[in-house]
């Protein structure tokens, strides 16, 4: 398999390629030979079964969250519901469609790889308290079921990365696309992806000289029409802004995504750029409503990795 440039793919082909790549990254790959239970120096990453790596207890104490060790979650959930309600009112006032999209963490989808002997399902993690209080009008999407169901077909996550793979991104965004563009069919647009080679993010925490591997990455459709290159200038991702334009996209509306790494470079915005004529990304934990209005957006998506829910952004 030799993909040296971005090519158009359908989801079935992406899945097939990623099954091969996952097998190559499994037992026998230098990164996957590390002993299960090995922790990174700051205990932010842990190695588990068959070479799977997971975020452990970094700044957000994610596994303590997952294992239900936090307190005060009822008040925390009430605060989130109030925030989502405020956002919904603001979106209505400004005439835009709003979606709150939370990305399930890796342990949520494949807990059997993290805890193979006694699977931890995380039923008392914070988001369960929040889900119990959410009403449908708050436009909340959490694609746990979709990603778990997809495991019957193939892997949804890289073994050595904290993020979903290209297949997982496509699966997770299916309910989002169904909500914001219900007439859009899977065959109405092509996904663009390319094969890359390098060390994935969690590998860098566990190895002084992290082993490289091949992986497939979604790439933008259309072209960049703006990029403030914030990371290149400051070394920080927060505050990064870029815009994509795809004149051949089937949906002519403009989307703004406020999010984190899942949107920035791990496929979400790039997939949306195949479907929508204009997509703008802002690395931000909160929604900047004046920017939404200045951009004359039609749709606002707030994307947030689950582990970051522990703190409220607008607060």
Image (cartoon, rainbow, N blue to C red):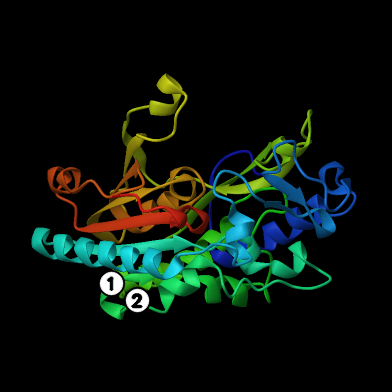
Front position in the image: 39 or 179: 39
Disc assigned to residue 35: none
277, above or below 98, in the image: above
Q: Nearer the viewer, residue 91 or 220?
A: 91
- Count the labels in the image: 2
In this view of the protein, can residue 13 be seen by the observer?
Answer: no
Give the foreground label among 1 and 2. Answer: 2
* For residue 145, side relative to residue 90 (left or right): right
The label number, if any, that marks residue 134 in the structure image: 2
Residue 302, position as x, y percentages in the image: 34, 56
Q: Residue 129 appears at what percent x and percent y? A: 46, 73
Residue 234's spot in the image, x, y percent?
42, 22
Near mark 2 (Cα within 10 A), the count class, few <14, some 14-19 or many ≥20, is some
Q: Is residue 105 left or right of residue 269?
A: right
Residue pictured at 82% horizontal, 47% vertical: 38
Number of residues whose C-alpha sits closer than 10 Å to that of mark 1, classed few (under 14), some (14–19) or many (20 or more):
some
Answer above or below: position of 15 versus 35.
below
**Residue 86 relative to residue 45: left or right:** left
Q: Which mark is residue 138?
A: 1
Rendered residue at 89%/47% (across/down): 33
Instruction: Report the residue that reaches farthest toward the front.
Output: 72
């Amino acid at each position: 398999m030799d993909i040296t440039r971005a090519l158009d793919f359908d989801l079935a082909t992406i899945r097939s390629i990623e099954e091969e790549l996952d097998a190559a990254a499994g037992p026998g790959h230098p990164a996957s030979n590390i002993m299960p239970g090995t922790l990174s120096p700051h205990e932010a990453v842990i190695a588990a079964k068959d070479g799977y790596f997971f975020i452990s207890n970094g700044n957000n104490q994610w596994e303590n969250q997952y294992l239900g060790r936090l307190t005060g979650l009822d008040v925390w959930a009430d605060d989130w519901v109030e925030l989502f309600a405020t956002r919904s009112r603001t979106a209505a006032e400004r005439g835009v469609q709003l979606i709150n999209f939370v990305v399930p963490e890796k342990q949520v989808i494949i807990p059997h790889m993290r805890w193979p002997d006694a699977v931890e399902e995380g039923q008392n993690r914070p988001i369960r308290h929040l889900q119990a209080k959410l009403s449908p009008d708050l436009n909340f999407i959490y694609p746990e079921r979709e990603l778990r169901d997809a495991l019957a077909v193939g892997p949804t996550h890289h073994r050595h990365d904290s993020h979903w793979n290209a297949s997982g991104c496509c699966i997770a965004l299916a309910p989002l696309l169904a909500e914001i563009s219900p007439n859009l069919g899977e065959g109405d647009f092509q996904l663009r992806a390319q094969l890359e080679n390098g060390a994935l993010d969690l590998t860098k925490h566990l190895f002084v000289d992290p082993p490289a591997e091949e992986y497939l990455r979604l790439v933008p459709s259309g072209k960049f029409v703006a990029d403030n290159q914030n990371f290149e200038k400051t070394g920080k991702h927060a505050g990064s802004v870029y815009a994509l334009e795809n004149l051949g996209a089937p949906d002519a509306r403009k989307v703004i995504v406020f999010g984190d790494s899942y949107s920035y470079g791990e496929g979400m915005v790039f997939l949306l750029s195949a479907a929508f004529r204009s997509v703008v990304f802002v690395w931000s934990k909160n929604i900047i409503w004046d920017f939404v209005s200045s951009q004359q957006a039609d749709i606002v998506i707030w994307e947030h990795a689950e582990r970051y829910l522990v703190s409220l952004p607008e607060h």
